Image (cartoon, rainbow, N blue to C red):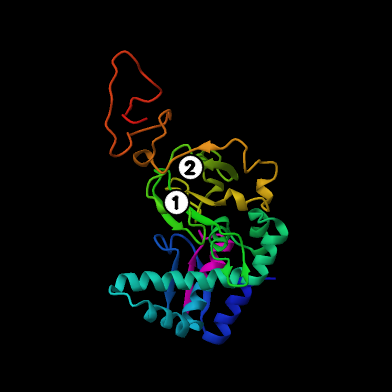
Amino acid sequence: ADLYGAIAERLRVKHQLGIRILPVDVLPDRLKRLDLHARQLQLSELLDPASRSFAAASELATLEARAEIDGLVKGAGFAERASERLFRRHLNSYFAAALMMPYARFLRACEATGYDIALLQRRFGAGFEQVAHRLTTLQRVGARGLPFFMIRIDRAGQSSKRYAGASASPLVETDARCPLWQLHHAFDRPGQLVRNLVELEDGSRWFTLARTVQPQAGRDGGYSTIFAVGVGLDAKLAAPLTAARGIDLTSGEATPIGLGCRACTRPDCPQRSAPPAGRVLVFNERERGLTPFVWAGE
């Protein structure tokens, strides 16, 4: 019932490592620090309970899954040390997520609740971003979940996390995104779940959910970190989702979006910021359309 307490006790008893929550004045620019001299895993008070559990579980990964992680890292055959260390960090994080949300139990909960992210958060003591990321990993042979993708962006639209999972979604593969996608509008409704059925130029439809997250609390007078995290999947597979109830996923109204203005050839988009790449611009001094860009071959 108390995963954080159980992890803390295991670290203390088996590894002689205590956990100490420190004031932000003591850890002004760190969220986590391992002090081997004091035998302490020091965590910032800025971390919420889910993030504290994740940090403790990540430390457990370095101590109890070292052999497995070393084997995976060695098998990957990285040429650069930085890439190897980044991969190792991802494996530690995967271990932590799997400890907080065990595969079989999490998948059963997903199927029983209609992939209700808010309910999954409460049931597993996890954050929205943690659950969203876990959804992209449910592809074990013989026990597959729905193929979700995940993306995290800041207010400038820059992505800091992208996981395609088994979705094969072009929405994750591209570096450019469409401002009409409601993922970007999540910042206008902090903490609320934003549903969106979108349609690409090729006719494919994707059902997406997005919400803002704050990885750690801010201080009065300081910067407040905020991101929008989105998850989605092929609309043809989204019917089991609680969040998709009441939406005609096949022929209902969908937001027409593209994969960034330079890759999009929709001629009547009022939000267009650039013409499609490789198209010849056409000018007519007597007319002005919804967009200043008109090109040959429309």
Lower sequence index among marks 2 and 1: 1
Q: Which residue is mark 2?
A: 200
Local SS, label 1: helix
Q: Quadrant of residue 119?
A: bottom right
Furthest toward the front, the residue is: 297
Q: Toward the viewer: 10 or 156?
A: 156
Q: x, y percentage for residue 68?
A: 47, 83
Find residue 73 and name its label: none
Q: x, y percentage for residue 272?
A: 38, 32
Answer above or below: position of 60 versus 106: below
Q: Is residue 43 visible?
A: yes
Q: x, y percentage for residue 115?
A: 65, 56
Local SS, label 2: loop
Q: Which residue is mark 1?
A: 170
What is the three-letter code of the residue carrying label 2?
Answer: Leu
For residue 192, side relative to residue 156 (left or right): right
For residue 1, side relative to residue 208 (left or right): right
Distance from disc 2 to disc 1, alpha carbons, whole Å, reads 9 Å
Task: Give the magenta-colored segment's residue range.
Answer: 39-56
Q: Are marks 2 and 1 in contact (CB under 8 Å)?
A: yes
Q: Is residue 102 visible?
A: no
Residue at left offset 33%, top offset 26%: 294
Q: Toward the viewer: 223 or 289?
A: 289
- Count residues near mark 2 (Cα–Cα under 10 Å), then give few for <14, some for 14-19, many for 20+: some
Q: Is residue 195 magenta?
A: no
Answer above or below: position of 68 versus 160: below
Residue at left offset 42%, top offset 71%: 89
Q: Is residue 46 magenta?
A: yes
What is the three-letter code of the residue carrying label 1?
Answer: Pro
Q: Toward the viewer: 247 or 181?
A: 247
Q: Point out the image quarter for the N terminus.
A: bottom right
